[in-house]
Image: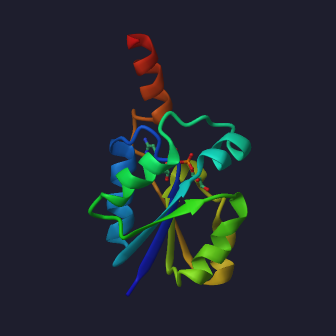
């Protein structure tokens, strides 16, 4: 079984998130998604999530491409995740191009996929804030 992992916040879930999960699953048989916790986002990513972790995790877990959801609590867990979950492929959007090549050291291939244009959680937040 070929196992794939990807990481993200997945706040205000949108087509860009769905498309990365769809394409990630195409690269293997089993997809693990590590979702940034509210604390990790706030402290490390300087992002305040609109949607709390529990809801973001439930939404992603319900997606047919996704086989398992785990929390992402820090920048440094990726190598451990890859070893502990016997991951073959690490996938993420190309906005991270080159940033995770070091994961090849623990035997995972590293794939950067083109982002879906024109959509982002930030844009959605701006649209929502204009309406209310
Ligand atoms: N994404 C995409 N197209 C978009 C928006 C996002 O392909 N229009 C992808 C991103 O490249 C990422 C995934 O969707 O692979 C999740 O995006 P975010 O929720 O913004 O995650 P991010 O803040 O990039 O967190 O340790 C890695 C981080 O957790 C990644």
**Where does the image place residue 106, in percent across and percent down from the top left?**
65, 82
Farthest left residue in view? 64
Question: Is residue 110 or residue 82 the one in the foreground?
Answer: 82
**Which of the 4 image quadrants contains residue 13?**
top left
Determine the residue located farthest toward the bottom in the rendered image. 1
Residue 14, position in %: x, y? Answer: 36, 41
Name the residue nearer the viewer: 19 or 42: 42
Q: Is residue 46 above or below residue 37?
A: above
Q: How many marks?
A: 0
Tell me the quadrant of the picture where the N terminus can be found. Answer: bottom left
Seen in the image, is 9 located left or right of residue 27?
right
* Left/right of residue 46 with respect to residue 118 in the rendered view: right
Relative side of 69 to 81, left or right: left
The residue lying toward the viewer, choosing from 121 and 109, is 121
Question: Does residue 7 sit above or below 84 in this rendering?
Answer: above
Applied colour scheme? rainbow
Percent from the top left, x then y, of residue 11? 47, 41
Query: In which quadrant will I find the C terminus?
Result: top left
Q: Residue at x 39, y 48 (%)?
A: 17
View extreme (front): residue: 54
Residue 46, how many percent across, how many down? 69, 37
| Quarter occupied by residue 73 | bottom right
Q: Is residue 82 left or right of residue 126?
A: right
| Residue drawn at (41%, 19%) of the image | 127
Name the residue at 39% across, 65% down: 24
Q: Residue at x 26, y 63 (%)?
A: 64
């Amino acid at each position: 079984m070929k196992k794939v992992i990807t990481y993200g916040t997945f706040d205000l879930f949108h087509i860009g998130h769905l498309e990365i999960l769809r394409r990630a699953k195409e690269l293997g048989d089993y997809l693990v998604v590590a979702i940034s916790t509210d604390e990790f986002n706030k402290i490390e990513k300087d992002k305040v999530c609109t949607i709390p972790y529990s809801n973001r995790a439930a939404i992603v877990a319900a997606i047919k491409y996704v086989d398992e959801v785990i929390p992402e609590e820090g920048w440094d867990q990726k190598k451990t995740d890859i070893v502990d979950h016997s991951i073959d492929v690490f996938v993420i959007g190309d906005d991270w191009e080159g940033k995770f090549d070091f994961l090849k050291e623990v035997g995972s291939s590293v794939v950067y996929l083109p982002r879906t244009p024109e959509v982002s959680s930030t844009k959605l937040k701006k649209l929502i804030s204009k309406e209310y």
